[in-house]
Amino acid sequence: MYKAIIAGLGKYLPDNVVTNNDLKKVMDTSDEWIVERTGIQERRHIIKGSGDTTASMGAEAAKIALERAQCAAEEVDLILFATLSPDYYFPGSGVLVQELLAIPDCPAMDIRNQCSGFVYALATADQFVRTGMYKNVLVIGSENHSGGLDMSTRGRNVSVIFGDGAGAALVTRYDGNDDRGILSSHLHSEGKHAEELSLIGPSTNRWVPQIMEENDPEDTSYYPYMNGQFVFKNAVVRFSEVIKEGLLQNQLAAEDIKLLVPHQANLRIAQFVQKKFGLGEDQVYNNIQRYGNTTAASIPIALTEAWEEGRVKQGDLVVLAAFGSGFTWGSSIIKW
Ligand code: ACO
Protein backbone atom coordinates (compact mmCIF):
# COMPACT_ATOMS: atom_id res chain seq x y z
CA MET A 1 0.00 0.00 0.00
CA TYR A 2 1.21 3.49 -0.87
CA LYS A 3 0.40 6.68 1.01
CA ALA A 4 -1.20 9.83 -0.35
CA ILE A 5 -0.57 13.45 0.61
CA ILE A 6 -1.97 16.76 -0.55
CA ALA A 7 0.97 18.30 -2.41
CA GLY A 8 -0.63 21.51 -3.67
CA LEU A 9 -3.75 23.62 -3.10
CA GLY A 10 -5.44 26.39 -5.07
CA LYS A 11 -8.60 28.46 -5.07
CA TYR A 12 -10.54 30.76 -7.36
CA LEU A 13 -13.27 33.20 -6.38
CA PRO A 14 -15.17 35.40 -8.82
CA ASP A 15 -14.43 39.14 -8.31
CA ASN A 16 -18.03 40.17 -7.78
CA VAL A 17 -18.72 40.65 -4.04
CA VAL A 18 -22.39 40.60 -3.00
CA THR A 19 -22.97 41.92 0.51
CA ASN A 20 -26.02 41.30 2.67
CA ASN A 21 -27.05 44.90 2.01
CA ASP A 22 -26.88 44.21 -1.75
CA LEU A 23 -29.36 41.36 -1.23
CA LYS A 24 -31.72 43.77 0.51
CA LYS A 25 -32.20 45.48 -2.85
CA VAL A 26 -33.85 42.38 -4.35
CA MET A 27 -35.52 40.65 -1.40
CA ASP A 28 -36.93 41.32 2.04
CA THR A 29 -33.97 40.50 4.28
CA SER A 30 -31.47 42.22 6.53
CA ASP A 31 -27.79 42.11 7.37
CA GLU A 32 -28.73 41.42 11.01
CA TRP A 33 -30.89 38.38 10.15
CA ILE A 34 -28.28 36.82 7.89
CA VAL A 35 -25.32 37.45 10.19
CA GLU A 36 -27.15 36.27 13.31
CA ARG A 37 -28.43 33.02 11.70
CA THR A 38 -25.50 32.11 9.44
CA GLY A 39 -22.48 34.34 10.14
CA ILE A 40 -22.35 35.29 6.44
CA GLN A 41 -21.48 38.92 5.61
CA GLU A 42 -20.82 38.60 1.89
CA ARG A 43 -20.43 36.03 -0.86
CA ARG A 44 -19.21 36.00 -4.46
CA HIS A 45 -21.56 35.76 -7.42
CA ILE A 46 -20.44 35.20 -10.99
CA ILE A 47 -21.32 38.12 -13.25
CA LYS A 48 -23.22 36.81 -16.29
CA GLY A 49 -21.05 37.09 -19.38
CA SER A 50 -17.80 37.20 -17.40
CA GLY A 51 -16.81 33.80 -18.76
CA ASP A 52 -16.63 32.23 -15.30
CA THR A 53 -18.26 28.81 -15.19
CA THR A 54 -18.13 25.87 -12.81
CA ALA A 55 -15.45 24.22 -14.97
CA SER A 56 -13.45 27.39 -15.66
CA MET A 57 -13.28 28.30 -11.96
CA GLY A 58 -12.26 24.74 -11.17
CA ALA A 59 -9.56 24.92 -13.84
CA GLU A 60 -8.18 28.19 -12.41
CA ALA A 61 -8.00 26.72 -8.91
CA ALA A 62 -6.42 23.55 -10.32
CA LYS A 63 -3.71 25.49 -12.18
CA ILE A 64 -2.56 27.00 -8.87
CA ALA A 65 -2.69 23.64 -7.07
CA LEU A 66 -0.64 21.98 -9.83
CA GLU A 67 1.91 24.79 -9.87
CA ARG A 68 2.33 24.63 -6.09
CA ALA A 69 2.70 20.84 -6.27
CA GLN A 70 5.17 21.26 -9.15
CA CYS A 71 3.12 18.83 -11.16
CA ALA A 72 2.76 19.36 -14.91
CA ALA A 73 -0.72 18.99 -16.43
CA GLU A 74 0.37 15.94 -18.42
CA GLU A 75 1.42 14.19 -15.21
CA VAL A 76 -2.17 14.14 -13.88
CA ASP A 77 -3.45 10.54 -13.87
CA LEU A 78 -7.05 11.20 -12.82
CA ILE A 79 -9.39 14.19 -12.43
CA LEU A 80 -12.12 14.05 -9.79
CA PHE A 81 -14.59 16.91 -10.02
CA ALA A 82 -17.02 17.46 -7.15
CA THR A 83 -20.00 19.72 -7.84
CA LEU A 84 -23.78 19.98 -7.57
CA SER A 85 -23.84 22.72 -10.20
CA PRO A 86 -22.13 21.26 -13.28
CA ASP A 87 -21.84 23.28 -16.49
CA TYR A 88 -24.02 20.78 -18.36
CA TYR A 89 -26.60 18.16 -17.46
CA PHE A 90 -24.10 15.90 -19.22
CA PRO A 91 -21.19 15.41 -19.67
CA GLY A 92 -19.71 16.21 -16.29
CA SER A 93 -17.41 19.16 -15.62
CA GLY A 94 -14.33 16.96 -15.09
CA VAL A 95 -13.87 16.47 -18.83
CA LEU A 96 -14.29 20.22 -19.39
CA VAL A 97 -11.47 20.93 -16.96
CA GLN A 98 -9.36 18.33 -18.73
CA GLU A 99 -9.82 20.25 -21.97
CA LEU A 100 -9.19 23.64 -20.34
CA LEU A 101 -5.95 22.40 -18.79
CA ALA A 102 -4.94 20.46 -21.90
CA ILE A 103 -4.49 17.24 -19.94
CA PRO A 104 -4.14 14.51 -22.59
CA ASP A 105 -6.44 11.50 -22.05
CA CYS A 106 -6.52 10.69 -18.35
CA PRO A 107 -9.86 9.59 -16.84
CA ALA A 108 -12.12 12.35 -15.53
CA MET A 109 -15.00 11.66 -13.18
CA ASP A 110 -17.62 13.85 -11.53
CA ILE A 111 -18.59 13.21 -7.91
CA ARG A 112 -22.19 14.07 -7.00
CA ASN A 113 -22.15 14.43 -3.25
CA GLN A 114 -23.05 18.08 -2.73
CA CYS A 115 -21.55 19.63 0.43
CA SER A 116 -19.67 16.39 1.16
CA GLY A 117 -18.38 16.21 -2.42
CA PHE A 118 -14.82 17.24 -1.68
CA VAL A 119 -14.43 14.80 1.22
CA TYR A 120 -15.86 12.00 -0.94
CA ALA A 121 -13.55 12.96 -3.83
CA LEU A 122 -10.51 13.12 -1.55
CA ALA A 123 -11.31 9.67 -0.17
CA THR A 124 -11.64 8.35 -3.73
CA ALA A 125 -8.31 9.92 -4.73
CA ASP A 126 -6.67 8.41 -1.66
CA GLN A 127 -7.87 4.92 -2.59
CA PHE A 128 -6.52 5.17 -6.15
CA VAL A 129 -3.15 6.34 -4.86
CA ARG A 130 -2.99 3.76 -2.04
CA THR A 131 -3.50 0.86 -4.42
CA GLY A 132 -0.83 2.21 -6.75
CA MET A 133 -3.21 2.59 -9.67
CA TYR A 134 -2.53 6.33 -9.96
CA LYS A 135 0.18 8.67 -8.72
CA ASN A 136 -1.30 12.16 -9.21
CA VAL A 137 -5.00 12.79 -8.71
CA LEU A 138 -6.41 16.26 -9.26
CA VAL A 139 -9.36 16.84 -6.92
CA ILE A 140 -11.58 19.85 -7.61
CA GLY A 141 -14.63 21.28 -5.89
CA SER A 142 -16.41 24.04 -7.79
CA GLU A 143 -19.86 25.61 -7.66
CA ASN A 144 -21.82 28.15 -9.63
CA HIS A 145 -24.87 28.61 -7.42
CA SER A 146 -25.83 32.19 -8.08
CA GLY A 147 -27.47 31.73 -11.49
CA GLY A 148 -29.89 29.12 -10.14
CA LEU A 149 -31.12 30.68 -6.92
CA ASP A 150 -34.53 32.20 -6.33
CA MET A 151 -33.38 35.73 -5.57
CA SER A 152 -36.85 36.92 -4.55
CA THR A 153 -38.20 37.02 -0.99
CA ARG A 154 -39.78 33.62 -1.65
CA GLY A 155 -36.34 31.96 -1.85
CA ARG A 156 -34.53 34.04 0.76
CA ASN A 157 -34.00 31.27 3.35
CA VAL A 158 -31.80 29.48 0.81
CA SER A 159 -30.46 32.15 -1.53
CA VAL A 160 -28.73 34.28 1.12
CA ILE A 161 -26.58 31.30 2.10
CA PHE A 162 -24.92 30.18 -1.12
CA GLY A 163 -21.95 31.61 -3.01
CA ASP A 164 -19.79 30.74 -6.03
CA GLY A 165 -16.16 29.64 -6.13
CA ALA A 166 -13.72 26.78 -6.56
CA GLY A 167 -10.90 25.02 -4.75
CA ALA A 168 -8.52 22.27 -5.82
CA ALA A 169 -5.96 19.88 -4.39
CA LEU A 170 -3.32 17.72 -6.01
CA VAL A 171 -3.25 14.39 -4.21
CA THR A 172 -0.03 12.55 -4.83
CA ARG A 173 1.81 9.38 -3.85
CA TYR A 174 4.19 9.89 -0.93
CA ASP A 175 7.20 7.65 -0.59
CA GLY A 176 8.67 9.10 2.62
CA ASN A 177 9.20 6.92 5.68
CA ASP A 178 7.51 9.26 8.17
CA ASP A 179 3.86 9.28 9.23
CA ARG A 180 2.62 11.90 6.74
CA GLY A 181 -0.44 11.13 4.64
CA ILE A 182 -4.21 10.88 4.50
CA LEU A 183 -4.61 8.61 7.51
CA SER A 184 -8.25 7.67 7.04
CA SER A 185 -11.52 8.70 5.43
CA HIS A 186 -15.01 8.16 6.85
CA LEU A 187 -18.02 8.39 4.56
CA HIS A 188 -21.74 8.04 5.22
CA SER A 189 -25.09 8.74 3.65
CA GLU A 190 -28.74 8.43 4.57
CA GLY A 191 -31.02 8.58 1.54
CA LYS A 192 -34.25 8.73 3.48
CA HIS A 193 -33.66 12.48 3.87
CA ALA A 194 -32.84 13.06 0.19
CA GLU A 195 -35.59 15.60 -0.33
CA GLU A 196 -34.92 17.70 2.79
CA LEU A 197 -32.17 19.54 0.90
CA SER A 198 -32.65 19.11 -2.81
CA LEU A 199 -33.33 20.48 -6.25
CA ILE A 200 -35.74 18.04 -7.84
CA GLY A 201 -36.56 19.59 -11.21
CA PRO A 202 -35.68 19.77 -13.99
CA SER A 203 -34.85 16.09 -13.87
CA THR A 204 -35.91 12.78 -15.37
CA ASN A 205 -38.86 12.88 -12.97
CA ARG A 206 -39.76 16.32 -14.16
CA TRP A 207 -38.46 17.13 -17.61
CA VAL A 208 -38.30 20.71 -18.89
CA PRO A 209 -41.19 20.23 -21.38
CA GLN A 210 -43.46 19.25 -18.47
CA ILE A 211 -42.43 22.32 -16.47
CA MET A 212 -43.01 24.51 -19.52
CA GLU A 213 -46.36 22.94 -20.29
CA GLU A 214 -47.61 23.47 -16.74
CA ASN A 215 -46.27 27.03 -16.80
CA ASP A 216 -47.08 27.35 -13.10
CA PRO A 217 -45.80 30.60 -11.56
CA GLU A 218 -45.91 28.94 -8.11
CA ASP A 219 -43.67 26.06 -9.25
CA THR A 220 -40.43 26.20 -7.27
CA SER A 221 -39.21 22.70 -8.16
CA TYR A 222 -36.30 24.09 -10.18
CA TYR A 223 -34.95 26.04 -7.21
CA PRO A 224 -33.07 24.48 -4.29
CA TYR A 225 -35.29 23.48 -1.38
CA MET A 226 -33.96 23.31 2.18
CA ASN A 227 -35.72 22.31 5.37
CA GLY A 228 -33.35 24.57 7.30
CA GLN A 229 -34.00 23.56 10.88
CA PHE A 230 -34.06 19.85 10.06
CA VAL A 231 -30.77 20.18 8.17
CA PHE A 232 -29.26 22.13 11.06
CA LYS A 233 -30.24 19.49 13.64
CA ASN A 234 -28.85 16.62 11.55
CA ALA A 235 -25.70 18.53 10.62
CA VAL A 236 -24.56 19.16 14.19
CA VAL A 237 -25.04 15.49 15.10
CA ARG A 238 -23.39 14.03 11.98
CA PHE A 239 -20.45 16.47 11.98
CA SER A 240 -19.69 15.50 15.56
CA GLU A 241 -20.10 11.75 14.96
CA VAL A 242 -17.88 11.60 11.92
CA ILE A 243 -15.08 13.67 13.47
CA LYS A 244 -15.19 11.42 16.53
CA GLU A 245 -15.13 8.32 14.32
CA GLY A 246 -11.98 9.56 12.56
CA LEU A 247 -10.22 10.46 15.80
CA LEU A 248 -11.09 7.11 17.39
CA GLN A 249 -9.87 5.08 14.42
CA ASN A 250 -6.49 6.81 14.64
CA GLN A 251 -6.38 6.78 18.46
CA LEU A 252 -6.30 10.54 18.54
CA ALA A 253 -8.02 13.10 20.74
CA ALA A 254 -9.54 16.51 19.99
CA GLU A 255 -6.50 18.23 21.50
CA ASP A 256 -4.32 16.59 18.83
CA ILE A 257 -6.14 18.52 16.11
CA LYS A 258 -4.02 21.36 14.76
CA LEU A 259 -6.74 22.55 12.42
CA LEU A 260 -10.32 21.48 11.79
CA VAL A 261 -11.60 22.68 8.44
CA PRO A 262 -15.35 22.07 8.47
CA HIS A 263 -17.51 22.44 5.38
CA GLN A 264 -18.65 26.05 5.54
CA ALA A 265 -22.37 25.35 5.90
CA ASN A 266 -23.24 27.86 8.54
CA LEU A 267 -21.02 29.54 11.13
CA ARG A 268 -23.40 28.45 13.90
CA ILE A 269 -22.90 24.79 12.96
CA ALA A 270 -19.10 25.18 13.00
CA GLN A 271 -19.26 26.95 16.37
CA PHE A 272 -21.44 24.18 17.80
CA VAL A 273 -18.90 21.56 16.70
CA GLN A 274 -15.99 23.64 18.01
CA LYS A 275 -17.65 23.87 21.42
CA LYS A 276 -18.58 20.20 21.48
CA PHE A 277 -14.94 19.15 21.01
CA GLY A 278 -13.60 21.92 23.25
CA LEU A 279 -11.49 23.34 20.42
CA GLY A 280 -9.90 26.79 20.58
CA GLU A 281 -10.45 29.54 17.97
CA ASP A 282 -7.04 28.76 16.48
CA GLN A 283 -8.02 25.09 15.93
CA VAL A 284 -10.96 25.78 13.58
CA TYR A 285 -10.87 27.55 10.23
CA ASN A 286 -13.90 29.51 9.06
CA ASN A 287 -14.29 31.83 6.10
CA ILE A 288 -18.04 31.54 5.46
CA GLN A 289 -18.25 35.18 6.57
CA ARG A 290 -16.67 36.21 3.25
CA TYR A 291 -17.73 33.52 0.80
CA GLY A 292 -21.01 32.08 2.04
CA ASN A 293 -21.61 28.37 1.58
CA THR A 294 -19.87 27.20 -1.60
CA THR A 295 -20.90 23.54 -1.14
CA ALA A 296 -18.27 21.18 -2.66
CA ALA A 297 -15.83 24.09 -3.02
CA SER A 298 -15.98 25.27 0.58
CA ILE A 299 -13.43 22.86 2.11
CA PRO A 300 -10.77 23.24 -0.60
CA ILE A 301 -11.20 27.04 -0.58
CA ALA A 302 -10.90 27.15 3.23
CA LEU A 303 -8.01 24.68 3.27
CA THR A 304 -6.16 26.70 0.63
CA GLU A 305 -6.62 29.92 2.59
CA ALA A 306 -5.53 28.27 5.82
CA TRP A 307 -2.41 26.95 4.08
CA GLU A 308 -1.70 30.37 2.53
CA GLU A 309 -1.95 31.92 6.00
CA GLY A 310 0.59 29.44 7.37
CA ARG A 311 -1.96 27.64 9.54
CA VAL A 312 -1.29 24.24 7.95
CA LYS A 313 2.27 23.01 8.17
CA GLN A 314 4.06 19.72 7.62
CA GLY A 315 3.41 17.35 10.52
CA ASP A 316 0.12 19.03 11.55
CA LEU A 317 -2.98 16.96 12.18
CA VAL A 318 -5.65 18.39 9.89
CA VAL A 319 -9.26 17.22 10.05
CA LEU A 320 -11.78 17.89 7.29
CA ALA A 321 -15.48 17.29 7.93
CA ALA A 322 -18.59 17.79 5.87
CA PHE A 323 -22.32 17.30 5.93
CA GLY A 324 -24.86 18.04 3.25
CA SER A 325 -27.61 17.08 0.87
CA GLY A 326 -28.30 13.38 0.50
CA PHE A 327 -27.90 13.42 3.42
CA THR A 328 -24.20 12.68 3.03
CA TRP A 329 -21.39 13.31 5.47
CA GLY A 330 -17.75 12.44 5.95
CA SER A 331 -14.36 13.27 7.39
CA SER A 332 -10.70 13.02 6.42
CA ILE A 333 -7.93 12.70 8.97
CA ILE A 334 -4.66 13.99 7.54
CA LYS A 335 -1.13 14.12 8.87
CA TRP A 336 0.10 17.01 6.74
N1 ACO B 1 -34.06 37.16 5.76
C1 ACO B 1 -35.00 37.51 6.62
N2 ACO B 1 -35.90 36.64 7.11
C2 ACO B 1 -35.84 35.38 6.70
C3 ACO B 1 -34.86 34.95 5.78
C4 ACO B 1 -33.95 35.89 5.31
N3 ACO B 1 -32.98 35.58 4.44
N4 ACO B 1 -35.05 33.64 5.56
C5 ACO B 1 -36.09 33.24 6.31
N5 ACO B 1 -36.58 34.29 6.98
C6 ACO B 1 -37.70 34.33 7.92
C7 ACO B 1 -38.70 33.24 7.67
O1 ACO B 1 -39.62 33.61 6.68
C8 ACO B 1 -39.33 33.10 9.02
O2 ACO B 1 -40.28 34.11 9.18
P1 ACO B 1 -41.64 33.83 10.00
O3 ACO B 1 -41.20 33.44 11.37
O4 ACO B 1 -42.35 35.13 9.90
O5 ACO B 1 -42.31 32.70 9.26
C9 ACO B 1 -38.18 33.38 9.98
O6 ACO B 1 -37.21 34.11 9.23
C10 ACO B 1 -37.55 32.14 10.54
O7 ACO B 1 -37.32 31.24 9.45
P2 ACO B 1 -36.67 29.87 9.64
O8 ACO B 1 -36.49 29.22 8.29
O9 ACO B 1 -37.41 29.13 10.69
O10 ACO B 1 -35.26 30.33 10.16
P3 ACO B 1 -34.20 29.54 10.97
O11 ACO B 1 -34.06 30.14 12.29
O12 ACO B 1 -34.40 28.07 10.86
O13 ACO B 1 -32.90 29.89 10.14
C11 ACO B 1 -31.46 28.91 8.53
C12 ACO B 1 -32.81 29.53 8.78
C13 ACO B 1 -30.39 29.95 8.72
C14 ACO B 1 -31.41 28.43 7.11
C15 ACO B 1 -31.27 27.76 9.52
O14 ACO B 1 -32.35 26.89 9.50
C16 ACO B 1 -30.03 27.01 9.27
O15 ACO B 1 -28.95 27.49 9.50
N6 ACO B 1 -30.19 25.78 8.84
C17 ACO B 1 -29.02 24.93 8.56
C18 ACO B 1 -29.01 24.72 7.19
C19 ACO B 1 -27.74 25.13 6.59
O16 ACO B 1 -26.79 25.56 7.18
N7 ACO B 1 -27.75 24.95 5.33
C20 ACO B 1 -26.60 25.26 4.58
C21 ACO B 1 -26.65 24.47 3.37
S1 ACO B 1 -26.69 22.82 3.72
C22 ACO B 1 -25.24 22.41 4.10
O17 ACO B 1 -24.30 22.96 3.61
C23 ACO B 1 -25.16 21.39 5.07
Image (spheres, helix red, strand yellow):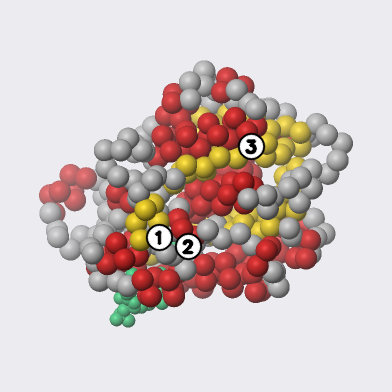
Determine whether 311 is above or below 227 in the image: above
Looking at the picture, which amino acid does disc 3 mark? Gly
Q: Residue at x 52, y 71 (%)?
A: 268
Q: Amino acid at mark 1?
A: Glu
Asked whether, in this view, residue 145 is left or right of residue 185, the answer is: left
Q: Is mark 1 within 8 Å of ligand 1?
A: no
- Residue 145, x across and y down, in percent: 36, 50
Near-viewer residue (268 or 117):
268
Q: Depth-wise, is mark 3 or mark 1 nearer the camera?
A: 1
Of callouts 3 and 1, which one flags the residue occurring earlier in the amino acid sequence? 3
Residue 49 is situated, as x and y percent measured from the top left of the image, at: 26, 38
Closer to the chain start, of discs 3 and 2, is 3
Give the CA separation, mark 3 to mark 1. 27 Å
Q: Residue furthest right?
A: 177
Q: Which mark is residue 42?
A: 1
| Label 2–label 1 contact, CB within 8 A | yes
**Residue drawn 54% across and 69% down?**
269
Using the numbered discs, state the Cα–Cα distance from disc 3 to disc 2 in whole angstroms. Answer: 25 Å
Q: Which residue is mark 2?
A: 289
Say above or below: 228 vs 144.
Answer: below
Q: Residue at x 68, y 53 (%)?
A: 311
Write the residue at 58% across / 35% down: 65
Q: Dot 1: few (<14), some (14–19), or many (≥20) neighbours within 10 Å?
A: many
Residue position marked by numbered label 3 in the rendering: 8
281 in relation to 170, above or below: below
Q: Which of the two labelled residues, at mark 2 and mark 1, occupies the earlier sequence position?
A: 1
Q: Is residue 234 above or below residue 297?
A: below
Query: Is residue 237 visible in this depiction of the protein?
Result: no
Quadrant where the image shows the N terminus: top right
Judged from the image, the secondary structure of the residue bearing numbered disc 1 is strand
Query: Which kind of residue does numbered mark 2 sit on?
Result: Gln
- Asked which secondary structure carries label 2, the reply is helix
